[in-house]
Amino acid sequence: DAKDTLLGRLFGYAALLRSGMPLEQAVQEAVFNNLLQFGQGKSFLRECAAAVALEAAERMDTEAIAAVAAPGQPLATMLAVKPADATPEALLLALVLWPKLPGSLLQTCHLLPANTPPPPAELFFGASAVRGGVLSPAAAAAAALTAAGLFSREHLQLLTPALLATSGSHPRMHTLWQYLLPLLLPGFRPHRKMDLLDVPAEAAAAEPSPSAGTIVANGSMDKKSAKAAAKAARAAKAAEGKGAANGLFLETFWSVVVEGGLMDSSHERRYLGFQLFSRVLPHLRPEHVPGVFSPEFTRTLAASVKRSDSYLHAGARKLLDGLSAFLERSDVADSSVKMAVAAALQRLGGLPMKQLSSSKITQKLVQGLDAEGVHRYVSSLMEAFLAGAPVVHSGAEDANGHDRAHGEEKAEDAERVIADRRGQCVEQLVAALKFPDVAQSDCEAALRFLALHAFAEVKTPPHGKASKSNPAEVHQAAKHLTSHLSSATRSRCASRLVTLIAHLSHAAQSRPRAAQQQQRQQDANAGKKASDAAAGPVEEAAAQPAAKKRKTSSNGGAEATAAAAKSEPPLATLHQHLHDTLSFIRKALKAPGVSLAVKLGDDGDNALQLLAAIETACLARLIHLEKGASHSHGKPAGHGVNTSAAIRSLATLAAHLQLQLLADPDGFEMDLPLSLRRVAAEGLGVEGLPEVEEQSDKRDEDGEEGAIGKPAGSSWNDVLVDVMLAVMARPVGSVPIAPLREAAESLWRQCCAVVSADGLADIVRVVAAGGKGEGQSTAGLFESDE
């Protein structure tokens, strides 16, 4: 009975307010206070009572609001609580009534940022709010000033408990978001669902009726003109407010509220994160897309789609299906947004693309992306990386008294935002380059871009003297790089550089294998058809076609193998991207104003030069072998070693060791280049290597071991064993270690036939140690066997 009584009073007050009857100020104040008391008494009535109270407040002037906000009144009690204990309805009332609240109450209300102007009233109550129109320039500027204080990291952290509590309205979104999102996303329609899941209905509602100009003389309608006019009107309407979201405010909001709050909580709150994503994405530009595809969000989305028994499975699939429908509409999302979303979906936790949704969203996106679209998107990501995320200063921030006290913290926040933005650009760049239609020129440009910003520091040359022979990437970085690159950003670039190089190498190796497999399948199908046609009813006669079938299949497989061998790329080109990237690094470091970002020291510089010399000499020797006579190609060089394959593997290993040295010089073993030189010179007959006998002789004269950690008279194959063990024992660092180990394993496969008894003993010692003895450590591997 009490519940029915409260509901009846609430509906009665709402009917009274919506009747249009003029009410005296005393009646308005009584209705407002009674509504708030209903909400305080029953939690299930709190949101509804607050919404009706706002309808009452819309009819009240400043004097009436001051009366209901006096000390002791329900409104003053709600707004005076600590932010950690505030309800979503308290934040809703404070935000909407902000322009009308008296100054005395604003001083005690911590839900609103200090020294920040209130939002314009027309943002919530004007015609633009009801019909989703565009704010006036003055109102838009005022709203931007309010957003600067409201969406600062410090204030969002205070509001997070109240924002997380809005999940109590699950599965419906709380009324608070209708008033908060217009400040975050200019152009957002607070009282109409601008939702990904409702795009078709929204478009249908927005489609204008045909104009009189589309009626032809005979009274019939020109359907083509009407369709074109309707499409143009939808495009113009969809473009309203698009891209107006402030990147800094959005990234801060998403990292604090969604990534750091909703995604690390209950299923209801994670579903609220899905709902916020669906309302935010239509207002973003391509550079904002990686921010909303944050790690925890994408991990939750991928896990929910993959597991059919997940509580969020249906919601996640519905979100992706709505996303697919939204992006398929060319008048709603341009190609850059499609590319950004497709690249972000590539990183959905390793989830197979066919499982993303029933409509196979990623396949549909990729089908509409050609090489030119990929090129434009890659170029935009590079520009966004150089620009970073410039800090936005507003009048509200300058007027805020806390600004100067926390200037250093704000600077650190800005640097973190810039680093996050650049990290997202790098991730999107690598994902975009894995699309099937990407051009090789874009891959090469991206590799040079990542290598330059991973290992080099670019400064403007003195007096602006820049050589015309400098690489284009150096000119671009010196001209457009807005701020210093952090160590985390450089580490991210180095890591993704190695990842992309490995991907391109594996792609180059898989192409001839795929062609060979396809040819074998075609020959097998042809042989099967011929066998079926020649088969007779008698079993004895059936044996001959079967034998013929096996013979045909065998011949077909041999022909396919020969064809694949002919079509297989030269050995050097399998890792051409790797060698070209290192060649670019060496060239870029010679340009004026370019230096290594991390100093290597004398030993590091010598090691880098020696590794580069080994790589260059191996590539030169490999070219000589490929151009030589047929009897010298692949012939063992007196040691039972396949020379071409071994030299190719050695060049790859030396190249990957250069990347490891540039990325992490402190953890690099400086003796490895000397060891590789012995393997190249003594074992593989590589010529043109720099002389290092003086260093070895000096160590030998002191009675110490050679550079490899072996006695001076040890064989080159024993040195190779220690190199392999040292490489395999390297811990995982800032860059992926798998490509380096693959190169070492490839070299070992080519040379393992000549392993000596001492080398085999070393391998047995390391395996027997099992990670518990010193034989598993890098330092122990280089100690003497004595």
Image (spheres, rainbow, N blue to C red):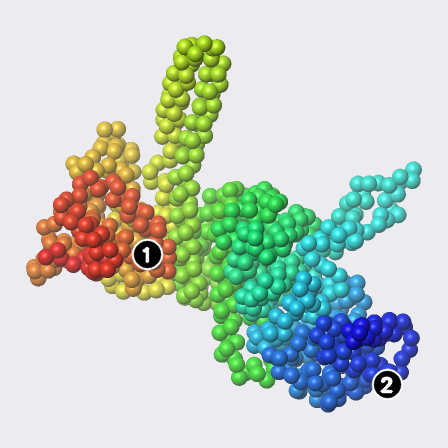
Residue tagged 2: 26
* Residue 615 placement, left or right of 405: left
For label 1, the crowd category at 10 Å Cα-Cα, with few meaning under 14, some 14 to 19 and many 20 or more, is many
Residue 496, quarter of the rendered image: bottom left
Residue 538, quarter of the rendered image: top left
Q: Amino acid at mark 2?
A: Ala
Give SS at disc 2: helix
Of labels 2 and 1, the one closer to you? 2
Pick the quarter of the image with the N terminus.
bottom right
Instruction: Answer yes or no: is residue 588 visible.
Output: no
Q: Residue at x 44, y 23 (%)?
A: 523
Could you say where residue 633 lies in the image, as x and y percent from the top left? 25, 32
From this view, report whether residue 743 is shown above or below residue 637: below
Instruction: Answer yes or no: is residue 164 visible.
Output: yes
**Residue nearest the viewer, comparing 143 with 181:** 181
* Residue 133 placement, left or right of 263: right
**Residue nearest the viewer, comparing 589 with 668:** 668
From this view, report whether residue 528 is shown above or below residue 165: above
Pick the quarter of the image with the C terminus.
bottom left
Residue tagged 1: 660
Q: Earlier in the sequence, mark 2 or mark 1?
A: 2
Is there a contact, CB below 8 Å, between mark 2 and mark 1? no
Checking the image for residue 689, the label placed there is none
Q: Amino acid at mark 1?
A: Gln
Give SS at disc 1: helix
Q: Residue at x 49, y 61 (%)?
A: 422
Could you say where residue 605 lies in the image, as x and y percent from the top left? 27, 60
Q: Residue at x 47, y 23 (%)?
A: 525
Compute the Cα span from label 2 to label 1. Answer: 77 Å
Could you say where residue 268 lies in the image, as x and y percent from the top left? 62, 64
